Image (cartoon, rainbow, N blue to C red):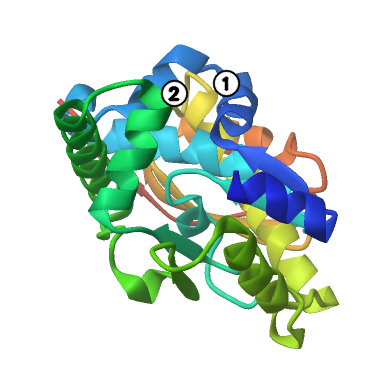
Amino acid sequence: MLAESLAKRLGYRCIDRDQIIQKAAAWGVSQDDLRIAIERPPTFLGQSHHTKYIYLAFIQAALTEEVRTGNAIYHGLAGHLLLGKGPHILRIRIIAPMEFRIGRVQEERKCNRQEAIVYIEKKDEDRRKWTRFLYGVDWRDASLYDIVLNLEQMSLDEACDVICCAARLKSFESTPEIQKTMDDLATASHVKANLAMNPLTSNLQFEVVAQGRSVSIKGDIVGPDQVKKIGSIVRAVPGVSEVHLEQLELVTRF
C-alpha cells in the first residue's frame, strides 16, 4: 500500500483510521459507533449538528495528538481537514480511472465487474456525503490538496518517488513556529474533547483557541454553574494554566 511504502522510505510513522478510532474512543464513545459514523453516510447520524460536533471533537483530539510531533503519514477520510492549513501538512489525493479501480476492487474483494462498480459508486457517494456533512466541503475539490496523483500511467513506486521528493522540500520542513502551531491545535482539540465528554457540558458547543498555556473559550451556556465547571475541565488538560471565558452567552432552552 502507498502509505506504508512512503512511511518505510521516509522513516515516518504510518497511522491509519483504525488507530485514530481506537484513540478517539478514550473520550467515551465506542469504537463501533465511531467506525459506523465514518463508514456510513450522515443520514445514519440523523443529520444532528451536535452529533457532528462531538464526533469531530473526539477524532480531531486523537488525530492532532498522534501527529503533533511530525514525521507521520496519516491515511484516512479527509483527515487533513482537521489539521488546519499551512506548510506543516502535505495534503495528497490519489485518483485513478474507473477501469483501474474496478480491477483493483475485483482483485481485492473477489467479486464480478458489476459488483465492483456498485461497491465503488457507493463508497464514493458515502464519502461525499460524509465530508460534506462533517466539513462542509466536497472532498473531490482539488484546491483542498497540494498534490493530486493519477495512477493511470504511474506505478505505486513512482507515486511514492513523487511524494517523497515533495515531502523533502524546504517548503514542508518543520520550524519552531510550526511546532507551536501544532501544539496549540492539539491542546485546543484536547480541551474541546474533554468538554464534549463531560456530562455537564456535553450538550454545548464551544470555540476553543490555545496559545501556549493559555486557552480561550467562546460559546453558549445554559446555566451559571457551567462557567465554573468549564474552567475546571479546561485546567485539567495537561499544560493549561490560564483560562479565558470569552463571550459565553446564557441562553434559555425549552
Q: Position of residue 70 (x, y in %)?
A: 77, 58
Q: Crowding near pointer 1: few (<14 within 10 Å), some, many (20+)? A: some
Quarter in which the C terminus is drawn: top left
Q: Position of residue 217 (x, y in %)?
A: 53, 53
Q: Position of residue 87 (x, y in %)?
A: 64, 77
Residue 66 seen in render = no
The residue closer to the viewer here, 38 or 12, is 12
Relative to 143, does residue 152 appear above or below in the rendering?
above
Q: What residue sits right under mark 2 in the picture?
A: 34
Residue 180 seen in render = yes
Q: Quadrant of residue 221?
A: top left
Q: Secondary structure at mark 1?
A: helix
Q: Residue at x 22, y 32 (%)?
A: 41
Q: What residue sits right under mark 1 in the picture?
A: 25
Dot 2 amino acid type: Leu
Q: Secondary structure at mark 2?
A: helix
Label disc, if present, on residue 16 of the rendered structure: none
Q: Residue at x 74, y 73 (%)?
A: 178
Q: Crowding near pointer 2: few (<14 within 10 Å), some, many (20+)? A: some
Q: Position of residue 100 (x, y in %)?
A: 33, 50
Give the Cα separation between the discs numbered 1 and 2: 8 Å
Dot 1 amino acid type: Ala
Q: Quadrant of residue 32?
A: top left
107 sits left or right of 211 in the view: left
Q: Are marks 1 and 2 in contact (CB under 8 Å)?
A: yes
The residue closer to the viewer here, 91 or 25, is 91
Q: Quadrant of residue 108?
A: top left
Q: Residue at x 67, y 40 (%)?
A: 15
Relative to 96, does residue 223 appear above or below in the rendering?
above
